[in-house]
Image (spheres, helix red, strand yellow):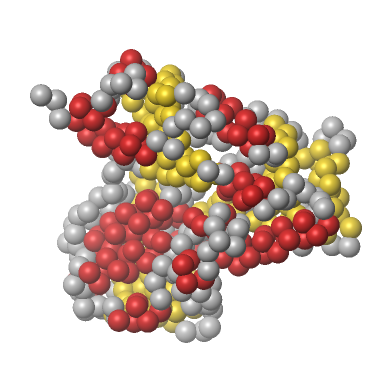
Amino acid sequence: MTLARGALPEAMAPEGHLVIVGAGQAGLMAAEALRSAGSPAAITLIGDEPHAPYHRPPLSKAWLAGEMDAAQLLMRAPEMLARKQITLQTGVTVQAIDRAAQSVRLSDGRALHYSGLVLATGATPRRLSWPGAEAANVLTLRSRDDALAIAAGLARCQAEGLPLVVIGGGFIGLEVAATARKKGVAVTVLEAAPRLLGRVLSPQLSDWYAALHRRHGVALELGVTIERLVVHDGQARAVQLADGRELPCALVVLGVGVQPNDALAREAGLVVDRGIVVDACGRTADPRIVAAGDCAARRLPDGRLLRLESVQNASEQGKAAAAALLGQERPFTATPWFWSDQYERKLQMAGLSEGADQAVLRGRLDDDSPFSVFQYRGGRLLAVDSVNAAKDHLTARKLLDAGVSPTPEQAADPGFNLASLLNPA
């Protein structure tokens, strides 16, 4: 596939209409970047939820716990967007893209012409097909309204004295579990793999998180297979495992990953491969269409595809895509970073650990001490996972951005100043 690049076609003059599909982090950043770059074009930001753009990371934590109000969750109020001459359309979906006519068809029957189009359609939580999984109290977490429904379910757990069952030992599931325990709800976490967060963390850090959750009273069931959900009166009342056990519950939360929302792009004839395929600047093969955020799969120089689910990626890819629509080159190639808050522990991850063959501990794996795990492949640093160690995390990002790799011995020595490698004498 050849991705669009270079000068804009005449039809893409900036005085046109720039349409952004998706009012989340990537869509909002693209809209604001277009306006900040001085584009005089009309800008329309379309969101399928009834809410103005809001922060999603707190949904599984402070918002779910009732520690944050709607005003704090809000990223941009509609009046702020209006002052920037960005038109926000909420509660409406884009049903089709007509690339030949350069228009999108909306669910309310309207058609909007575009001179440039940003697809920031995000992702949708997976729902698996066990018998009983359609019960009303089997929920996923992606939106503000999802979190409110889960909060109501946690209140039912407390009222009935029954546990929450979380299916999936990834970040969303574990964050929900931690928040539920803070509220005094009994929690069981079911994970099909032999360890938590197995795709992203080293075995020693996976084990540390398992111990952390168990210390807080979470019942962990690893390497289990689910047979079905036992439903009465439309509600899941237990989860039955393949070994015959039934685990009672008043609420089930699914945290088994997401699927990129790429159907709109696929139906429009764009290249899709587990996400909308783009280059480092967010460009698709159509010079008038870019994509950013959880829906986008970036083609790497070696031909592999990389799709990241993070605030950083959504923000920076949104800005890169906006620049591409204006005929500018602003590739997003910085080191990926992520974070997760569980109990009083903040995990900060820099880099991608896939393929690591060595993990080096900096600090002590105990309950209270900050520590980091440096992950290597062939002696070269790939990623650093830090728990309550913000200084390590910030240094790791700088090292990875600069392509500087401390030796495993240097990383393991808490007395060695890693930052000194960035400015050698």
Residue 284 in the image: x percent, y percent? Answer: 34, 56
On the image, which quarter does residue 141 sit in? bottom right
For the view shown, which residue lies furthest in the top direction?
409
Vertical comparison of 162 with 364: above or below:
below
Q: Who's the residue at 58% across and 47% down the image?
A: 175
Nearer to us in this view, 259 or 11: 259
Q: Please indicate, yes or no, whether residue 22 appears anywhere in the rendered image.
A: no
Nearer to us in this view, 19 or 56: 56
Residue 399 in the image: x percent, y percent? Answer: 26, 32
Q: Would you say 143 lies left or right of 39 here?
A: right
Q: Quadrant of the C terminus?
A: top left
Q: Who's the residue at 47% across and 39% down the image?
A: 347
Q: Who's the residue at 45% across and 35% down the image?
A: 387
Q: Would you say 240 lies left or right of 204 here?
A: right
Vertical comparison of 180 with 222: above or below:
below
Vertical comparison of 18 with 328: above or below:
below
Nearer to us in this view, 158 or 251: 158
For the view shown, which residue lies furthest in the left direction?
425
Q: How many numbered marks does the figure carry?
A: 0
Q: Please indicate, yes or no, whether residue 238 appears anywhere in the rendered image.
A: yes
Residue 316 in the image: x percent, y percent? Answer: 32, 54
On the image, which quarter does residue 367 sit in? top right
Q: Would you say 407 lies left or right of 236 here?
A: left
Q: Who's the residue at 34% across and 33% down the image?
A: 392
On the image, which quarter does residue 15 sit in? bottom left
Vertical comparison of 239 with 44: above or below:
above
Nearer to us in this view, 225 or 237: 237
Residue 362 in the image: x percent, y percent? Answer: 40, 23
